[in-house]
Image (tube, rainbow, N blue to C red):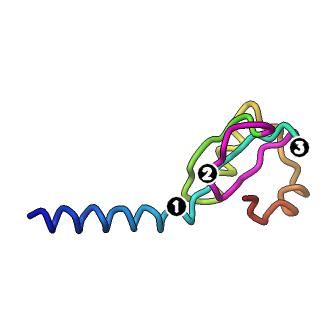
Amino acid sequence: MKRWIAAGALLLATGTVGLADSLFWVVGNHATGKCEIVTSNPVISGDIWFGDGPYRSRSDAKLARSTIRACPPVNPDEEKDGESDTN
């Protein structure tokens, strides 16, 4: 029985790490004055004043960013330029 519990815990731990690769966060950046979508769990210090997430898709993070009052509206031109992931 202990083997099954240990095997289940190991499987759960490795599965969780695999899912973390496809998550997105919305962060507020004082230096740029914008809210950015990043693919790594943000550390709240310095210029980063808040982090929200994780979200399962970039579109979910974009929707969340549009509802956060602290985030300024995003221009469609900036949206096209900012398609690459920020880490």
| Mark 3, residue position | 32
Where disc 1 sits, the SS reads: helix
Label 2 environment density (alpha carbons within 10 Å; few <14, some 14–19, many ≥20)? some
Quarter of the image where one finds residue 76: bottom right
Mark 2 and mark 1: Cα distance apart in space? 9 Å
Q: How many marks?
A: 3
Q: Name the residue under label 1.
A: 20
Q: Residue at x 64, y 56 (%)?
A: 40
Structural distance between the alpha carbons of marks 2 and 3: 19 Å
Q: Is residue 56 left or right of residue 83?
A: left
Calculate the distance from the C-alpha at mark 1 to the C-alpha at mark 3. 26 Å
Q: Is residue 55 left or right of residue 8?
A: right
- Which residues, given as a range, are shown in magenta? 33-47
Q: In which quarter of the image is the N terminus?
A: bottom left
Amino acid at pointer 3: Thr
Decide: is 83 above or below 65: below
Residue 2 coordinates in the image, percent (x, y): 12, 62
Q: What element carries label 3?
A: loop
Query: In this image, 80 relative to 5: left or right?
Result: right
Other-residue count near label 1 (Cα within 10 Å), few / some / many at <14 / 14–19 / ≥20: some
Tell me the quadrant of the picture where the C terminus can be found.
Answer: bottom right
The type of residue carrying mark 1 is: Ala
Find out whether the residues at labels 2 and 1 contact each other: C-beta distance under 8 Å: yes
Q: Quadrant of residue 21?
A: bottom right
Task: List the residue tagged with mark 2.
Answer: 41
At 88% from the left and 50% from the top, the residue drawn is 75
Q: Which x, y percent locates residue 73?
A: 83, 41
Query: Element at badge 2?
Result: loop
In this rendering, position of residue 18 left or right of residue 64 = left
Observer-nearest residue: 6 or 36? 6
Q: Position of residue 60 (x, y in %)?
A: 61, 53
**Disc 1 or 3, which lies upstream in sequence?**
1
